[in-house]
Structure formats: C-alpha cells, structure tokens
Image: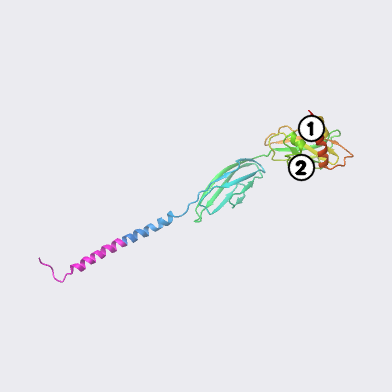
Amino acid sequence: MYYPKNINYGTNFAYIIIEILKYIIMKKIFLLILAVPFFFTGCRIEPYANFHVSKVIVDVGEVIYFTNTSFDASYFEWDFGDGTISYILDPVHVYSATGTYTVTLTAISRDDIIDRSFQTITVLFPTILELTVLEYYDEYPVANASILLYPSYDDWLDETNYLPEGFTNQNGNVIFSNLEAIRYYVDVWEANHDNYTLADEDIGFIKTHRLYKNEINYFTAWVDYYPDKKSSRNKSIIIRKLDRRSVEDKK
C-alpha cells in the first residue's frame, strides 16, 4: 500500500482528538455561563405573607391582637389603614374611630422581594353606659361619687368581678365604655350618700336594663343622703352588704 511521504498520521490523529475535546469543553463552559443567571435567580428566596387577627369586628377602643404567620421573610411592615405603621412581629392595635379599615402586612425577604397579605377590620361604636347619680328625695346630682359595676347581683353583694371604678363629675354623671351587652348592678358610694338602703327596698334601684350593643345606654342611680355618715367606703360596704347577704340567705 502506498503512503504519502512526510505525513505523521499519529500526530494528526492526536491533534484532531485534542481539538474535539477543546470544542466539547468550551461548549460546556458556554452552557454553564448561560445557566449561572438562572441558577442564582432560582436561589432567590421569595417570602410568603400571612397573618391571623383576634377579631375582625371590634368596638372603638378595643384591643386587637395580630399574629404573624409569614415565612421566608426578614422584615415586616404593618399598615393598619388609619395612618398607623408598625414594624414589630406580632403587634397589637386600637382604633379610635368607627369605620372599615384594611390592614396590610408586607413581608420582605433578604433579597428585597416582597409579598403582601390583607384583612378588613370593621370598627363599631362601643357599647356605652351613661350613668347619672341623683339624691332620691330632692333629686340633686351627687358629685365625686364612686361607681362600681357588677355583672350579677351576687357579685354586687360579695364585691367580686367589678369593672374599673368610675367617679361622677359635678353634674353627677359618669360614663363607662366598651361594655358587654348585659345587665349591670350598680354600686354607688359617696361620703354622705349610697344606694344600699334603696336596694333593700327594690333591686330595680341598682339594676340596669340589658344594654343595647353598640349604642349609648342611660341609667339613673338614685341614692339616699346620710348627713352623719363617717365610715369609709370599704367599711360601709362590708357591714351593710353583709347584712343584706344574711337577709338574702334567709329567703
């Protein structure tokens, strides 16, 4: 067989193999370079925003608790829809006016990617009791009288489960807000007045009607005048209500 002179077939074959390998390697590098942006894009963490709220229908002044259940987020922003912003994880909020508000939670990842969750809150007028203390016979207003509200007559007798104390102004008025729509039993004490004797005569003197929810309710608390009463409020309550309890137990 004839072979052309001056041709190194072994060397040319090795050269071809090397060129093929270089081509394969360069192609893989090229494809890898194209894939890098997609790789890093795929690794970006996308947050998920979500939260729970204690109540979606509340009264003015009622505390609302928010529980953040978001994940894959590094920062949070709460917008309560009334111009108030918070950046804490689980905030609480109180609305000062009636209306419908949209709460927005923005969850922000470390890559500044955001997601949002929304919830509508309805804020109603609170249930209010406006109470006026008058002397029974002469019907003059009693100022600076201590008022306690109880959810039951037994509580009134035993001095248990009462609401925070209120005091009448110069017109004998005091207002209690954010109440339950129930009947209350009214305890009135002032240095020379109380309603304990009247309560002995008729429980209606201390018992309100069942309050209308989300409305202003009114009640007149009549009291007797005792010009020589010297005892403190607590001592007077203990003695006179213990006497009433003994009477009730005999019925």
Q: Main secondary structure of the magenta part?
A: helix
- Between the residue at mark 1 and the residue at mark 2, the CA separation in whole angstroms equals 18 Å
Residue beneath label 1, please?
Answer: 205
What residue is shown at x 31% (from left), y 60% (from top)? 27
Residue 166: in magenta span: no
Decide: few, some or many residues near mark 1? Use Cα within 10 Å; few <14, some 14-19, many ≥20: many
Decide: few, some or many residues near mark 2? Use Cα within 10 Å; few <14, some 14-19, many ≥20: some
Q: Secondary structure at mark 2?
A: strand
Tag shown at residue 166 = 2
The residue lying toward the viewer, choosing from 96 and 4, is 4
Q: Residue 4, percent across and down?
A: 13, 68
What residue is shown at x 23% (from left), y 66% (from top)? 14
Q: Of marks 1 and 2, which one's residue comes earlier in the chain?
A: 2
Give the residues drawn in magenta, as a range: 1-25
What residue is shown at x 26% (from left), y 65% (from top)? 18
Residue 14: in magenta span: yes
The residue lying toward the viewer, choosing from 218 and 144, is 144
Q: Amino acid at mark 2?
A: Gly
Residue 156 in the image: above or below residue 4: above
What residue is shown at x 19% (from left), y 67% (from top)? 10
Examine the image and state in which quarter residue 16 appears. bottom left
Tag shown at residue 39 = none
Quadrant assignment for the N terminus: bottom left
Q: Secondary structure at mark 1?
A: helix
Q: Amino acid at mark 1?
A: Phe
As drawn, which residue projects farthest toward the bottom?
6
- Label total for image: 2
Q: Residue 184, percent across and down?
A: 73, 35
Asked which colour scheme the image uses, the reply is rainbow
